Image (cartoon, grey):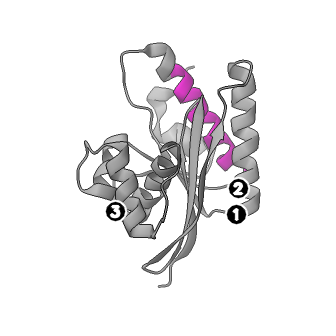
Amino acid sequence: MTTDRIILGIDPGTTIMGYGLIHQKDKDIKLITFDIIKLGSLANQPVKLKKIFESVSIIINNYHPDEMAIEAPFYGKNIQSMLKLGRAQGVAMAAALNNNIPIFEYSPRKIKQSVTGKGNSSKLQVAAMLASLLSIKELPKYLDATDALAVAMCHYFQKTDNNNDAKGYSTWNSFVLQNPDRVKK
């Protein structure tokens, strides 16, 4: 069976959001692009969320990914930051769902582990490994871009059909069915 797919990786954020795209043809992986969306200068949270939705929608329209992989929010001490990050993730997911693109969510630890072999690797270690794997000649100024690329690579490395860590959502209904505890009634 031949595999030919484009994977969009998203590293959600409300100041800087990273994205990266790779093309898989069987076992060959090619870098398409990776970059960031700067959001820090925007007026407020709703404006940032609108920009995230619009930007992810443009990326989807330009590159036509088959799947989207996104980093799951991590649990930290600052609840406000986590709430903002969750909103950013949700809006990016909505853009993918609006285009009928299945979504797969991975923990930060799982992403680092799949790329470097260690779940506690630094951003720089992840970026260096990606540079080696994808022949990236120069690392970007913002490592959020390589973090997003790492999410896409993590998805590539997973056997999503047999992997319980990867959760795919192709519609809001499938998301709700797989995450009843995240839905407020």
Q: Is residue 57 left or right of residue 24?
A: right
Q: Was residue 84 drawn as part of the magenta stretch in this picture?
A: yes
Instruction: Identify residue for label 2.
Output: 60
Label 2 vs 3, first from the N-terminus: 2
Image coordinates of residue 80 in percent, x first then y, are 50, 14
Tell me the CA gap for discs 3 and 1.
Answer: 27 Å
Q: Was residue 69 drawn as part of the magenta stretch in this picture?
A: no
Q: Are marks 2 and 1 in contact (CB under 8 Å)?
A: yes
- Residue shown at 49%/55% (left/top)? 149
Tell me which segment is drawn in magenta.
Answer: 83-98
**How would you rate the neighbour count of disc 3 (Cα within 10 Å): few for under 14, some for 14-19, many for 20 or more?**
few
Instruction: Identify residue for label 1.
Output: 63
- Residue shown at 58%/39% (left/top)? 17
Which mark lies nearer to you, 2 or 3?
A: 2
Q: Secondary structure at mark 1?
A: helix
Q: Are marks 2 and 3 in contact (CB under 8 Å)?
A: no
Q: Is residue 25 left or right of residue 162?
A: right
